[in-house]
């Protein structure tokens, strides 16, 4: 598994100041993707335990509200194991901070073992014809911003409510 980059202070991918990691590799290749440099599974840098430790160290500041995991495609079969390990270690260390994940896969198809560590999932592939620059946390109107833990508890999709977090 590989990753593309780590942003040490990100204010555009989730609420508050966050650490973001962009996983490398995506097979969706959405038209007009804002991150097409992450499509190649052979690009970027090797994702290791050292990468996870670096991300956790960056998150260990009071002003950091959480971790955002994007891509590429963090939930692709080639990436999901590393994404899950990172999310699990993050939640073990920071149960008061949130994990947001962006994926072209729909919530209903994502492995529940991975979902148990995620607070918010922005799901669905970006669609140019549904692009709307006024949408918060997503690029096109077909995408959903899902409160994962509430959805798992209720066994139905519950959309993210910013006041809850």
Image: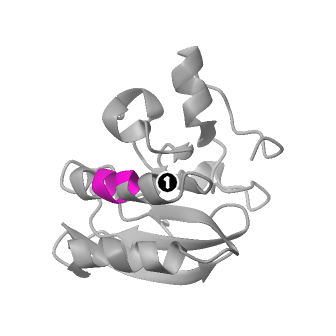
**Majority secondary structure in the magenta region:** helix
Q: Is residue 111 visible?
A: no
Picture quadrant where residue 66 is located = bottom right
Residue 145, x across and y down, in percent: 63, 43
User: What residue sits 78% from the left and 41% below the top?
Assistant: 164
Please say if 76 is above or below 142: below
Total number of numbered discs in the rendering: 1
Q: Residue furthest front?
A: 93
Q: Is residue 7 left or right of residue 154?
A: left
Q: Residue furthest top?
A: 155
Q: Is residue 112 left or right of residue 102?
A: left
Residue range (magenta): 83-88
User: What residue sits 30% from the left and 68% below the top?
Assistant: 39
Picture quadrant where residue 150 is located = top right
Q: Is residue 52 visible?
A: yes
User: What residue sits 45% from the left and 79% below the top?
Assistant: 57
Please say if 165 is above or below 110: below
- Find out whether residue 119 is within the magenta segment: no
- Find out whether residue 87 is within the magenta segment: yes
Picture quadrant where residue 8 is located = bottom right
Residue 157, x across and y down, in percent: 59, 24
Residue at which label 1 appears: 102
Q: Nearer the viewer, residue 18 or 101?
A: 18
User: What residue sits 56% from the left and 20% below the top?
Assistant: 153
Quarter placement of the N terminus: bottom left
Count neighbours of disc 1 (C-alpha within 10 A) and say few if under 14, some if 14 to 19, many if 20 or more: many
Residue 10, x across and y down, in percent: 62, 77
Q: Nearer the viewer, residue 150 or 134?
A: 150
Please say if 142 is above or below 80: above
Q: Residue furthest right?
A: 163
Residue 126, x across and y down, in percent: 52, 53
């Amino acid at each position: 598994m590989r990753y593309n980059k780590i942003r040490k202070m990100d204010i555009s991918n989730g609420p508050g100041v966050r650490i973001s990691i962009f996983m490398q590799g995506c097979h969706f290749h959405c038209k007009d993707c804002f991150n097409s440099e992450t499509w190649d599974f052979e690009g970027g840098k090797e994702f290791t335990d050292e990468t996870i430790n670096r991300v956790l160290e960056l998150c260990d500041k009071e002003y950091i509200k959480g971790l955002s995991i994007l891509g590429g495609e963090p939930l692709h079969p080639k990436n999901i194991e590393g994404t899950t390990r990172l999310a699990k270690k993050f939640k073990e260390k920071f149960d008061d901070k949130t994990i947001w994940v962006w994926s072209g896969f729909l919530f209903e198809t994502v492995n529940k073992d991975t979902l148990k560590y995620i607070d918010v999932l922005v799901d669905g592939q970006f669609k140019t014809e549904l692009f709307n620059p006024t949408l918060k946390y997503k690029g096109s109107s077909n995408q959903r911003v899902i409160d994962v833990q509430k959805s798992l508890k209720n066994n139905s999709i519950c959309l993210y409510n910013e006041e809850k977090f």
